[in-house]
């Protein structure tokens, strides 16, 4: 993957640099402007919550940031790479190496153990069996599940399943953790546990972008971006609520 030169003002501390991003579905009178010129920069080590109601454009923005869809216009740089200049294979490699995804529905493979679920991105990356086992064990230990390596998803609580998903997201040492409504399927106790884990990851220097519709979840971040009608209507730094 060839490095694209980083332009002035997009210094090496910027993990994400989005400029004038638009996304239009359909044509003519039926066109839907899901994103209408979004500018967003996220520095290394930031914990950013992107919040908005259903239909606001936050899910479309998530797909752009995760290299799961392409914009109609605008530019997106991830770790200095101009994503629009990468072909499908290069974007796939970029997703696997640089982005750790955490989803509302966990997306764990039912018939495999916690350890095997966490190993999966490393298998795609061609890491040797011994090395990927070591890294998966370390990731599960980091999220407090060192004693659940052999458990399958149906043997774990919802909160534990989400922690397995967090470990899987961490195992490739990505530049960005991208979380989509990560507490949406959890009870209040498990929600607190997962958000405490995110706090710890942020304190350790991880870059986190979290998509949510829940103000209480967003309050745990130290920067909140509000999306409305496909635009960023607010971008506010705030002190994180104590857990």
Image (spheres, rainbow, N blue to C red):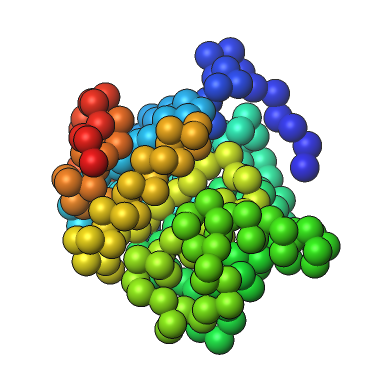
Quadrant housing residue 189: bottom left
Residue 27 seen in the current view: no
Query: Would you identify the image quadrant in which residue 8 lies?
Result: top right
Q: Relative to 37, does residue 111 appear above or below in the rendering?
A: below
Q: Position of residue 96 (x, y in %)?
A: 64, 55
Of 88 and 10, nearer the camera is: 10
Q: Residue furthest bottom?
A: 111
- Please state if 139 lies on the left or on the right of 4 as rendered: left
User: Height in image: 5 above or below 195?
Assistant: above
**Which of the 4 quarters of the picture holds residue 84?**
top right
Q: Nearer the viewer, residue 64 or 84?
A: 64
The residue at the point 60 percent across, 45 percent down is: 174
**Which residue is depicted at the point 17% across and 46% down?**
216
Q: Quadrant of the C terminus?
A: top left
Toward the front, the furthest residue is 147
Residue 14 visible (yes or no): yes
Tell me what residue is drawn at x 43 percent, y 84 percent.
154
Vertical order, 116 against 56 (above or below): below
Q: Position of residue 119 (x, y in %)?
A: 66, 66
Quadrant that contains the N terminus: top right
The number of callouts visible is 0
Establish if 133 lies above or below 153. Answer: above
Q: Which residue is drawn at 56% across and 86% down?
A: 111
């Amino acid at each position: 993957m060839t490095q694209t030169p980083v332009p002035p003002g997009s210094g090496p501390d910027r993990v994400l640099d989005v400029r004038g991003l638009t996304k239009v579905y359909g044509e003519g009178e039926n066109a839907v402007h899901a994103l209408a010129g979004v500018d967003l920069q996220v520095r290394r080590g930031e914990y950013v919550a992107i919040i908005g109601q259903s239909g606001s454009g936050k899910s479309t923005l998530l797909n752009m940031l995760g290299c799961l869809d392409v914009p109609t216009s605008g530019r997106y740089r991830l770790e200095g790479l101009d994503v629009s200049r990468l072909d499908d294979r290069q974007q796939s490699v970029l997703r696997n190496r640089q982005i750790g995804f955490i989803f509302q529905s966990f997306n764990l493979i039912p018939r495999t153990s916690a350890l095997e679920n966490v190993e999966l991105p490393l298998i795609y990356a061609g890491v040797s069996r011994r090395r990927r086992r070591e890294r998966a064990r370390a990731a599960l230990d980091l999220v407090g599940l060192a004693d659940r390596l052999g458990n399958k998803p149906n043997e774990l609580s919802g909160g534990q399943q989400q922690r397995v998903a967090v470990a899987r997201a961490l195992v490739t040492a990505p530049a960005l953790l991208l979380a989509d409504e990560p507490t949406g399927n959890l009870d209040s106790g498990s929600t607190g546990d997962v958000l405490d884990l995110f706090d710890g990851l942020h304190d350790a220097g991880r870059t986190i972008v979290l998509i949510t519709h829940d103000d209480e979840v967003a309050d745990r971040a130290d920067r909140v971006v509000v999306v409305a009608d496909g635009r960023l209507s607010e971008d506010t730094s705030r002190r994180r609520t104590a857990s």
